[in-house]
Image: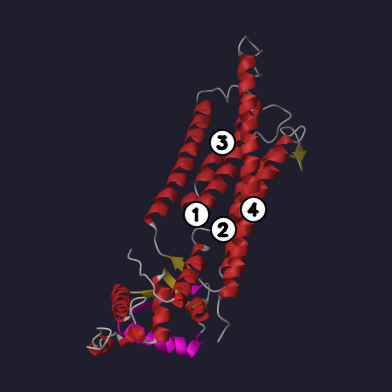
């Protein structure tokens, strides 16, 4: 794609306004990014709440509701995009090869992660590791559908993830949910936890530290995303103010 | 040839389809995106509907832009794309203009 250099300051401003407006329909998410950060932080807080794994709401495990949060974010992202950033119609941004490659890098990376989780879950089920154990009475319904969650997370990605920032937000939300689905599988289907052996304590400590680091990373990312999203939204409002008055 | 070394013919050779300020603004906006909705083009250029329609028709007749008509639900939506000819004409216009303008400090 060839770009045209502009001469006068007014023409340059026109071109910049157009590119900025188009960016909100292709790369930037504004308040949706802030919402992604907020949801990521809320999910961490929920996970840290006492009895998180066993808590029940309306005859279902609390966690069974939380695993839908990434989809809730996708829906709200679409609503925000239409309601807030398309008031003046659609402007498609000029293609940017480098940006597209980066976007696909994120999408494919997340897809690879989800496919690996899905295959591991299916293998665990097919090999009899999960089938051999009846779902525990405390958990209902047997969360068989959770086996398909990675696939559900995977399906909408190529169509709804438009920017790198969105891919990051989706990856953080999905990553957190997957992190809970693994113990949920094992807790509901798997054999009782093995007795602690020599070395398990160290493994447990390393896992605990790893989880703690992950939690801090998510909290930091969430806070930054909220600030970035709000800042982007302010930029958009400034952009609207910069437009000439209607003729 | 005048004092600044610019031939008057060079000025007359400017593409008048692009040189007109409204059309220059339209082409500039269209060159900055892949496809632009009528509403945005109207707001960003500050032109009236009729004026914008008139200029886009002229640019389309010259082969510098193409109109894309679509529906969002039941609402018809008009958008524009700059053509390769339009992009070339705009680039050529900028080059011509740059060549015509005196350099800084050399009136």
Tell me the colour scheme of the image. Answer: secondary structure
Contact between marks 4 and 1 (CB within 8 A): the answer is no
Residue at image position (24%, 83%) is B5
Residue at image position (49%, 60%) is A26
Among the two numbered marks 4 and 2 on one chain, the one whose residue lies closer to the N terminus: 2
Q: How many C-alpha atoms fall within 10 Å of the one at disc 1: few (<14), some, or many (≥20)?
A: many
Magenta segment boundaries in residue numbering: B47-72
Contact between marks 2 and 1 (CB within 8 A): the answer is yes
Among the two numbered marks 3 and 1 on one chain, the one whose residue lies closer to the N terminus: 3
Q: Chain of mark 3?
A: A
Q: How many C-alpha atoms fall within 10 Å of the one at disc 4: few (<14), some, or many (≥20)?
A: some
Residue under circle 1? A163
Q: Are marks 2 and 1 on the same chain?
A: yes
Along the viewing direction, whichever of A107 and A97 lies nearer the viewer: A97
Residue under circle 2? A29
Residue under circle 4? A227
Residue B81 higher or lower than B107, as above or below:
above
């Amino acid at each position: 794609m060839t770009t045209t250099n502009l001469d006068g300051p007014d023409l340059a401003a026109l071109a910049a306004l157009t590119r900025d407006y188009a960016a909100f329909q292709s790369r930037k998410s504004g308040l949706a990014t802030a919402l992604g950060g907020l949801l990521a932080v809320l999910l961490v807080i929920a996970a840290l709440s006492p009895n998180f794994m066993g808590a029940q709401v309306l005859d279902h495990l609390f966690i069974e509701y939380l695993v839908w949060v990434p989809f809730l974010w996708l829906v709200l992202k679409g609503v925000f995009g239409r309601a807030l950033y398309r008031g003046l119609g659609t402007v498609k941004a000029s293609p940017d090869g480098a940006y597209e490659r980066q976007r696909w890098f994120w999408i494919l990376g997340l897809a690879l992660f989800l496919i690996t989780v899905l295959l591991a879950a299916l293998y665990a089920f097919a090999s009899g590791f999960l089938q051999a154990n009846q779902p525990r009475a405390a958990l209902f319904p047997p969360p068989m559908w959770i086996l398909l969650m990675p696939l559900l997370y995977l399906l909408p990605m190529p169509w709804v993830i438009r920017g790198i920032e969105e891919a990051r937000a989706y990856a953080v939300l999905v990553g957190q949910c997957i992190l809970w689905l693994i113990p949920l599988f094992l807790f509901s289907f798997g054999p009782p936890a093995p007795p602690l052996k020599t070395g398990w304590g160290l493994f447990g400590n390393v896992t605990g530290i790893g989880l703690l680091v992950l939690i801090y990373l998510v909290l930091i990312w969430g806070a930054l995303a909220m600030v970035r999203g709000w800042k982007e939204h302010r930029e958009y409002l400034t952009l609207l103010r910069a437009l000439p008055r209607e003729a | 040839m005048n004092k600044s070394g610019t031939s008057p013919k060079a000025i007359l050779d400017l593409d008048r389809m692009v040189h007109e300020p409204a059309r220059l603004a339209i082409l500039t906006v269209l060159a900055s995106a892949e496809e632009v909705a009528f509403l945005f083009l109207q707001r960003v250029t500050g032109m009236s509907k009729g004026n914008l329609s008139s200029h886009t028709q002229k640019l389309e007749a010259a082969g510098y832009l193409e109109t894309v008509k679509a529906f969002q639900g039941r609402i018809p939506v008009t958008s524009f794309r700059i053509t390769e000819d339009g992009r070339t004409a705009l680039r050529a216009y900028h080059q011509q203009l740059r060549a015509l303008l005196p350099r800084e400090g050399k009136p």
